[in-house]
Amino acid sequence: MYAIRVRLGAHALVAGRGRVENGGMMNDAQDRFEMELLEAALEQARKSLSEGGIPIGSAIGSLEHGIIAVGHNEREQSGDTTAHAETVCMRHAGRRRDWHTLTLASTLSPCIMCSGTAILHKVPRVVIGENRTFMGAEDLMKEHGVSLRVVDDPRCVALMEEFIAARPELWDEDIGVVSE
Ligand SMILES: [Zn+2]
């Protein structure tokens, strides 16, 4: 756990709104909550994989209210091309007026559609498991004042690397890569 924390510190991007910052240091309770959110997202990603789906998971919540909703990519399971993890997770969170107080976690860097959903509802903080296998619309989120934290969790990287190697055509379809 110690080693992971050191890496988190090195990779934490503290930008945009200062809600979770505490004199330049990340608040410990928020830090732990964000890791809890990411664990829930990872559990969702594994669940999707076990169902024959794309292994991307998401969770949303706040330190005050805990985990409010989780979700995973359901495109393979449901046939809905927009059923990405983050979007499904926010759908599960229902209609709300407190989006601006929530933290969204995803095992993978959110694509432009999911980033757009988070931006639209003014979610201020997004925790990203990894962005090595896919770089989403992080610049767009930052432009809109979203504070990002890239954890670079090796478990999230391995999950995607294995999936992309095994099912490249499913992955290309998910991220809108046009096949020849
Ligand atoms: Zn997406």
Image: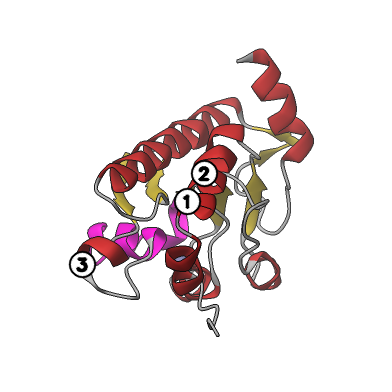
- The spot of residue 128 in percent (x, y) is 57, 48
Q: SS at mark 1?
A: helix
Do the residues under discs 3 and 1 have CB atoms within 8 angstroms? no
Please tell me which residue is depicted at 61% across the width and 46% down the height of the picture: 130
The answer to whether the beta carbon of the residue marked 1 is less than 8 Å from any atom of ligand 1 is no
Q: Which dot marks residue 162?
A: 2
On whether residue 43 falls in the magenta region, the answer is no
- Could you tell me the amino acid type at mark 1? Ala
Nearest to N terminus: mark 3 or mark 1 = 3
Q: Position of residue 44 (x, y in %)?
A: 33, 43
Residue placed most toward the observer, 95 or 8 = 8
Disc 2: CA contacts within 10 A as few (<14), some (14-19) or many (>=20): few
Query: Cα distance, mark 2 to mark 3?
Result: 22 Å
Badge 3, how many Cα within 10 Å: few under 14, some, many 20+? few
Image quarter of residue 117: bottom left
Provide the residue designation for mark 1.
166
Residue 43 visible, this angle: yes
Amino acid type of the residue that numbered disc 3 sits on in the rendered structure: Ser
What residue do we see at 66% from left, 73% from top?
140
Q: Quadrant of the C terminus?
A: bottom right
State the CA–CA distance, disc 3 to disc 1.
Answer: 21 Å
Residue 24 visible to an observer of this rendering? no
Range of magenta residues: 85-104
Q: Where is mark 3, residue-wise?
A: 78
Left of 180 or right of it: where is 151? right
Q: x, y percentage for residue 19?
A: 60, 48
The mark lying in front, picked from 2 and 3, is 2
**CA gap, disc 2 to disc 1?**
6 Å
Q: Name the side, left or right, on which 131 lies relative to 64.
A: right
Residues tagged 2 and 1 counted as in contact (Cβ below 8 A): yes
